[in-house]
Amino acid sequence: SLARITELFGVIDCAFGGSSGGYSTFLLESIAINPYLRSCGPKNDPRLCTEHATRARAALLIKSMQGSLRVVDAGSGLSYLFDWLAFMAEEYNVLRDLLMGPRPIDGVGFLVDVLQRGLDFANKDLLRALLTS
């Protein structure tokens, strides 16, 4: 949806968010400040792109981000992180229902279990605080 918004309305120049929104904001800002985004000429030709071309180029960068990160992975564990984040997204509804149910403590236990599955990427101090609280 970010790519489509960019195609329709242009490069996003102001955004904010926490958690996963922070990651999206970082990536959007990185795309917006890319010097090649608005330069449509050959290497040493500073011709600027039209607004339509700039929108299309930015949208393509957004659409290709996940695929690019998977290629860059090359065994660094990044694909494991994507798999874990996909798992977290699938388990979100279960977690929400447990936390909003009659025994919210079950949701905390479930969250700790999910975090332990992604231990390499979890904040160990936060995990320890959850386990001991």
Image (spheres, rainbow, N blue to C red):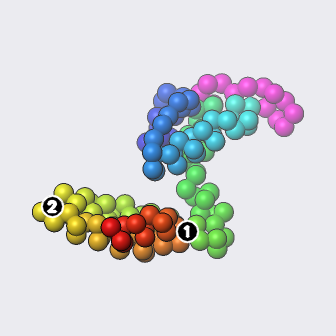
**Amino acid type shown at disc 1:** Ser
Check the picture and name the quadrant holding the C terminus: bottom left
Question: Splitting the image into 4 quarters, where does residue 75 fall?
Answer: bottom right
**Amino acid type shown at disc 2:** Gly
Tell whether position 34 is magenta: no
Residue 79: assigned label: 1
Q: Residue at x 73, y 35 (%)?
A: 35
**Residue 9: percent from left, percent from top:** 49, 27
Q: Residue at x 69, y 27 (%)?
A: 49
Q: Residue at x 63, y 31 (%)?
A: 54
Quick one: SS at disc 2?
loop
Residue 44: assigned label: none
**Residue 57: percent from left, percent from top:** 62, 38
Circle nearer the viewer, 1 or 2: 2
Tell me the CA gap for discs 1 and 2.
33 Å
Q: 77 or 18, which lies in front?
A: 18
Tell whether position 52 is magenta: yes
Would residue 3 be visible to someone looking at this image?
A: yes
